[in-house]
Amino acid sequence: MDWYERDFDHPDYFEIYANKEKEAAEEGSALATYLNLPPNSLVLDLPCGWGRLHPYWAMKGWKTVGGDLSSLNLDIHASKHPNELVRLDFRHLPFKSSVADGVMCAFTSWGYFHEEEDNLRQLCEFARVLKPGGILLLDLAGRHYLENAIVLMEGYWYHVDDGDYMERVRWTRSKKRIITDRIKNGHHFRHNIWIPTENEIKIALEKSGFHIDKCWGGLGGEKLMSSSERWIYRAICEKTTKPTPLSNVDSIVSFVYACLILATHFL
Ligand SMILES: C[S@@+](CC[C@H](N)C(=O)[O-])C[C@H]1O[C@@H](n2cnc3c(N)ncnc32)[C@H](O)[C@@H]1O
């Protein structure tokens, strides 16, 4: 089982992240303003978690559908904020193509997969379900901010609160991912998240069919800087209705086929 299937689907996760509920008002209102879509837009909340940000999407008058891999998160969402909810994996969204006006991807919910192509696939799936011109809001942690934040304690276990909680943060050897170990009530959690550079984010967005329209370095409209705590991107889906160009393999097959036709004609 991969870490992201296990860690978010355990009752202790909600205790560890209890403070995120208090931050929801500030995050939800800012992110909704950044996405900037009119009322009645169809916005996919991917991932929706336990729905802490849902009220701020509803305030905008959007029709939202929430999706998440964790059944426990979805159950809590349904009990607190009933809405259309779907259990899903980012890599295979159970939606038709070109249906949504917006995708909200809040609170560092990209980079979970070990394989680069799976992380790219998540963005490609977002692009697939968006209408041409649809908007993705991608809210990530700033890599350099994290680097500075953990430099003093990297690799050390530290105890929080009354001692029933311990945490250790460290980079992987390649310095591409951060592994956060947490022990709460004797239960061991391990997040293992790719923390991309600005350039890697830009390349991935471009490769999956987006162009960056705006970006911010925080929730108060701050300019994105390499030292910013958050890197938030508003990206537009550049899909066109033109037929997709032939892949290399398709082109080679077509070329060989054309040669064969010519050869049979002239021989
Ligand atoms: C950090 S939380 C963010 C949730 C929500 N956006 C918020 O801000 O409260 C990440 C969420 O991603 C979900 N998740 C993890 N891996 C996933 C996957 N492969 N497909 C869909 N959801 C996934 C987790 O279950 C968890 O609810």
Image (cartoon, rainbow, N blue to C red):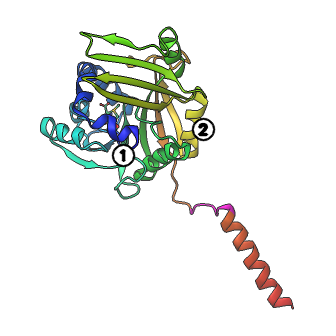
Q: Which residues are magenta?
A: 243-248
**What residue is drawn where x is 52% and y is 55%?**
240
Residue tagged by mark 1? 101
For the N terminus, which image quadrant? top left
Q: Residue at x 49, y 29 (%)?
A: 214
> Which amino acid lies under the numbered mark 2 shown in the image of this protein?
Ile
Residue at the (52%, 44%) spot, across then down: 120
Q: Image quadrant of residue 47? A: top left
Q: Secondary structure at mark 2?
A: helix
Is 40 left or right of 98, judged from the image as shown? left
Name the residue rendered at 31%, 11% in the picture.
160
Give the CA separation, mark 1 to mark 2. 23 Å
Q: Position of residue 89 (x, y in %)?
A: 37, 48
Q: How dense is the environment of label 1, judged by Cα within 10 Å: few (below 14), some, or many (20 and up)?
A: many
In the image: residue 110, left or right of residue 5:
right
Within the magenta stretch, is there residue 140?
no
The residue to which callout 2 is attached is 203
75 or 185: nearer the viewer: 185
User: Which marked residue is nearer to the observer: mark 1 or mark 2?
Assistant: 2
| Residue lying farthest to the left in this orientation | 79
Q: Can residue 247 be found in the magenta stretch?
A: yes
* Res 69 quadrant in image: top left
Q: Residue furthest front?
A: 186
Can residue 217 be seen at all in this image of the molecule? Answer: no
